[in-house]
Image (cartoon, helix red, strand yellow):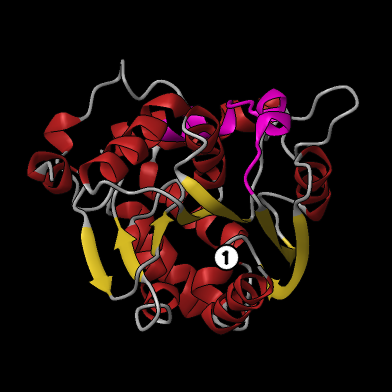
Amino acid sequence: MNTEILKRNNVQIKGQGAKTMVFGHGFGCDQLVWQEVASAFESEYRVVLFDYVGSGKSDKSQYSTERYNSLHGYKQDLLEVCAALDLENIIFVGHSVSSMIGALASIEQPQLMDKLIMVGPSPHYLNEPGYTGGFDKEDVEELLEMMEVNYKEWAKYLAPVSMQNPERPELAEELEQLLCSNDPVIARQFAEVTFKSDVRAELEKLAVPTLILQPKFDAIASPEVGQYVHSKIVGSEFMVMDAMGHNPHISDSRETVCRIKEYLAKK
């Protein structure tokens, strides 16, 4: 067991069971967003939570712009955490960009995952001819510029757009606080890597059984994008949730748990 990597990525292990579930957080967040969902699996599974380098309580001194200038640097974090724990045949649950990080890891090491669960995934956020990612290039450049000029205002703007659920404003406030807890320079690079990533060509290489959990309204990764992901991954299952917004694991952890358990019970 490589304790340096476990410390670097703030790895936390809970629960019991022969099979391991690993949860990966999305951009701007950390492992705490999975707390309510992950705890529901501790009685049956060994549950592993971690922070990508630069996020949460990871060792930020290990962050480098060279390693993390693409999703492959974050993929390497995931692979190294799993190697440090000697993991194989895991169930990986990834939110948003972590869905694609998990896909890249599974393609590189096919024996690593038994199942892949994607929550609000998007392989490409930019609109292209014949593909609707949801954002024009100008929108993303504006967002990145806003992060540089006034990071807190950017967080205040993005949180309610991402979270939705306007009748529960405390959810957007919680997400805003989480976004503001990040190092603005690291967060800006992670945002650029996320919103300019393009994993579309990789999806057809994915051979692991995959569940796509799609909130019925998501301003970041629309149902149309979720359907695209489903169409490219052979044998994948697509579930539209009742939950609204890009963060169903926060806004509706109960439904998220139920949908995952429902899928795992079938296989």
Residue 185 in picture, x, y percent from top left: 30, 31
Question: Total label count?
Answer: 1
- Left or right: residue 67 compared with residue 166: left
Residue that protrudes farthest toward the top in the picture:
66
Residue 217: name its quadrant. bottom right
Q: Which region shows up in magenta? A: 190-208
Q: Residue furthest right?
A: 130
- Horizontally, residue 250 falls left or right of residue 17, namely right
Residue at 48% from the left image edge and 54% from the top image edge: 92
- At x 73%, y 31%, the residue is 204
Judging by the rendered image, the residue that carries numbered circle 1 is 163
**Amino acid identity at mark 1:** Met
Verify whether residue 9 appears in magenta. no
Which of these two is toward me, 160 or 87?
87
Q: Is residue 19 left or right of residue 181?
A: right
Against 239, is 110 above or below?
A: above
Res 214 visible: yes
Instruction: Examine the rendered structure and indicate whether residue 170 appears above or below residue 9.
Output: below
Task: Please check the rendered image and state whether residue 200 is part of the magenta-colored stretch, yes or no.
Answer: yes
Residue 5 in the image, given as x and y percentages of width and height: 16, 40
Q: x and y percent of residue 116 in the render?
A: 57, 52
Q: Find residue 216 and report its horizontal and vertical position in percent.
A: 77, 67
Q: Can residue 148 be seen in this snapshot?
A: no
Q: Is residue 255 toward the left or the right of residue 188 in the image?
A: right
Asked if 228 appears above or below 177 in the picture, the reply is: above
Q: Nearer the viewer, residue 123 or 77?
A: 77
Q: Identify the residue at image location x=40%, y=20%.
A: 69
